[in-house]
Amino acid sequence: MKKEKVLVIGGSSGIGLATAQRLTRETYSVVITARTRARVDQALGRIGGAASGQILDYGDPAGIAAAFAQIGAFDHLLLAGAGPAAWGAFAELSRDALQAAFASKFWGYFDTLQAALPTLADRGSIVLVGGAAARITLPGTAGLAAVNGAIERMGLTLAKELAPRRVNVLSPGLVDTPAYDWMAPEARRGMLEGTAAKLPVQRYGTAEDIAEAVLFLVRSSYVTGAVLDVDGGARLG
Ligand SMILES: NC(=O)c1ccc[n+]([C@@H]2O[C@H](COP(=O)([O-])OP(=O)(O)OC[C@H]3O[C@@H](n4cnc5c(N)ncnc54)[C@H](OP(=O)(O)O)[C@@H]3O)[C@@H](O)[C@H]2O)c1
């Protein structure tokens, strides 16, 4: 049987990498992307299985087109790549930081998704990784809420507009990934454990938790227009 092909944007780290690993253990072939060849190759070494890679950087529209020309036809698209997020109290939130976050995550998803449509299977699917900041009201995350809220709302409209392709949004809560490598180890541990203590599940998320949920969305052919919260219950307040 021919394996379905999943394109994982941002497959070199964190959620994207864990998903690529999970999918190759099932009946999928995977193409991952990262911004450099070195990052692609490093990730492929950690995935094994039926995976290949392409360079794709949201900041390089010509490069995005070139990547899709190389990738050819595929069945499912996971958008999981993002640069730095715009954290901080609204009163001090820098316009430049928020614009950079939109440029990386929102416009990156937008450009990549538009470029993907000609080669994405008619009965294929799209998973947009949003973020719990758009689902809860947590002071200090207005910038994250704006970017992820835009992606979430756009995704739901696309579930109708791009049908019969399926479009779903996966909304992670706090997940320990290299996205937090910039933090001092003590502060990182404090954030993770402090959050875990307040969650119904009493732990923070792992990239593997999210990978499991992506797998569900990819193979569930009756699910579209869903926002799947994988957040340990954070949205319950
Ligand atoms: N971790 C969390 O707590 C959390 C919570 C809610 C939502 N999310 C969302 O989950 C998604 C994945 O996050 P993560 O935690 O797994 O992050 P991560 O470990 O930092 O991985 C980020 C990925 O994005 C790629 N990337 C960065 N800038 C890019 C650009 N300009 N163009 C294309 N690709 C780029 C990176 O590739 P390189 O190898 O080239 O750097 C890497 O593969 C993001 O959309 C994030 O907003 C995460």
Image: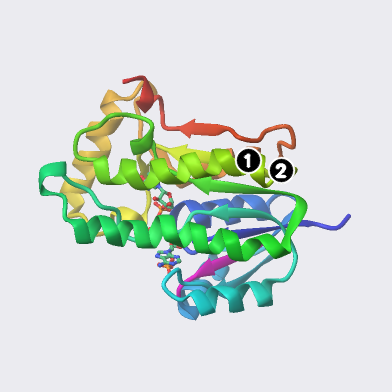
Task: Based on the picture, tell me whether residue 31 belongs to the magenta stretch.
Answer: yes
Image quadrant assignment for residue 202: top left
Residue at 21% from the left image edge and 61% from the top image edge: 96
Could you say which is closer to the camera, residue 138 or residue 210? Answer: 138
Residue 146: image location, x then y, percent: 33, 44
Residue 144 seen in the figure = yes
Q: Amino acid at mark 1?
A: Ala
Q: Which residue is mark 1?
A: 159
| Labels 1 and 2 touching (C-beta < 8 A) | yes
Q: Residues within 10 Å of mark 2 (few under 14, many from 20)?
A: some
**For residue 10, side relative to residue 48 (left or right):** left
**Quarter holding ligand 1:** bottom left
Residue 87: image location, x then y, percent: 22, 48
Q: Which residue is mark 2?
A: 163
Residue 168's disc number: none
Q: Amino acid at mark 2?
A: Ala
Residue 32: image location, x then y, percent: 58, 65
Figure label count: 2
Residue at 29% from the left image edge and 62% from the top image edge: 100
Residue 214 seen in the figure = no
The magenta span reads: 30-35
Q: Quadrant of the N terminus?
A: bottom right
Identify whether 222 is placed above or below 109. Answer: above
Identify whether 137 is placed above or below 154. Answer: above
Q: Residues within 10 Å of mark 1 (few under 14, many from 20)?
A: many
Task: Based on the picture, tell me whether residue 204 belongs to the magenta stretch.
Answer: no
**For residue 56, side relative to residue 180 (left or right):** right
